[in-house]
Image (cartoon, grey):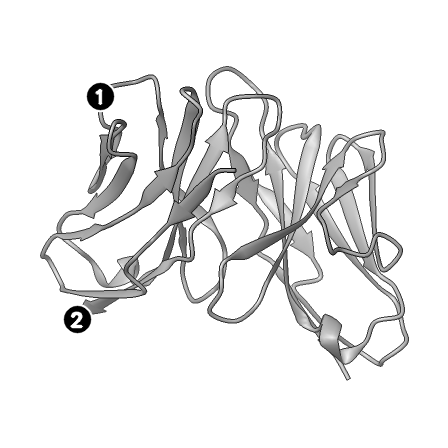
Amino acid sequence: AQTVTQSQPEMSVQEAETVTLSCTYDTSESDYYLFWYKQPPSRQMILVIRQEAYKQQNATENRFSVNFQKAAKSFSLKISDSQLGDAAMYFCAYRSAGSNYQLIWGAGTKLIIKP
Amino acid sequence: GAVVSQHPSWVICKSGTSVKIECRSLDFQATTMFWYRQFPKQSLMLMATSNEGSKATYEQGVEKDKFLINHASLTLSTLTVTSAHPEDSSFYICSARKPGTGIETQYFGPGTRLLVL
């Protein structure tokens, strides 16, 4: 069975600086998808970024980028120029490429932005 | 876009009553919707997968007679918590799979806070 591990329960960063959130996963599959979701205090889950395992190029979305290391089974999220609005819980999630569309979730990392 | 709405946003009910939560995909058709439960400061726990026109698939440990799921159309799934008790108090979130090419991402509703007195 696949598992997702987020080893940092909480991270803090100074506003305008860069922070990296860690995520590792375990799978025997070769084709899958990885996601980072953000859950602010409103508790609305928001998709931040996604990555197809077959793509070597790391995904980027404005200030958000990932470092996808397939061999190491690592999928870290880098947030550049951190803003107060980035404060939230961040969840890493894995999904098989097969017909089962279920997401497997990490425990989450709480990101605190210091003004 | 991919917008998912959830109604109500929060509800308080008496023990023993039933509560229905609606999940709608507003700008796309969702053949598959998911229902999650989230306890404070924890990750999401998948309760069931709802496929349009068929019975929901429940995760191990989730009582299907307690949490009734209906996915009658491509844009609507409902979760009914029957004979609710205080231990059912939680945050319930739905998501909808947006079909198409490439990654078929799940988009989430804003959640429903349920408090059973």
Q: Identify which amino acid the numbered label 1 is placed on.
A: Gln
Q: Chain of mark 2?
A: A
In the image, which disc is placed on residue A114?
2
Q: Are marks 1 and 2 in contact (CB under 8 Å)?
A: no
- Crowd class of label 1 (few under 14; some 14 to 19; many from 20; radius 10 Å): few
Going from the N terminus, do you reach mark 1 or mark 2 first?
A: 1
Q: On the image, numbered disc 1 is attached to which residue?
A: A57
Q: Residue at x 50, y 43 (%)?
A: A104
Q: Nearer the viewer, residue B28 or A88?
A: A88
Q: Nearer the viewer, residue B111 or A6?
A: A6
Residue B1 shows up from this direction: no
Q: Residue at x 50, y 22 (%)?
A: A97
Residue farthest along the bottom direction in this orientation: B117
Q: How much space separates mark 1 and mark 2, taking CA atoms?
A: 31 Å
Label 2 residue SS: strand
Q: Quadrant of the C terminus of chain A?
A: bottom left
Residue A84 shows up from this direction: yes
In the image, which disc is placed on residue A19?
none
Q: Quadrant of residue A26?
A: top left
Q: Residue at x 17, y 55 (%)?
A: A82
Q: Chain of mark 1?
A: A
Looking at the picture, how far across and down is residue B40, in whole percent? 52, 71
Looking at the picture, how far across and down is residue A64, in whole percent? 23, 41
Q: Nearer the viewer, mark 1 or mark 2?
A: 1
Looking at the picture, how far across and down is residue A8, in whole percent? 28, 60
Q: Identify which amino acid the numbered label 2 is placed on.
A: Lys
Same-chain status of marks 1 and 2: yes
Label 1 residue SS: loop
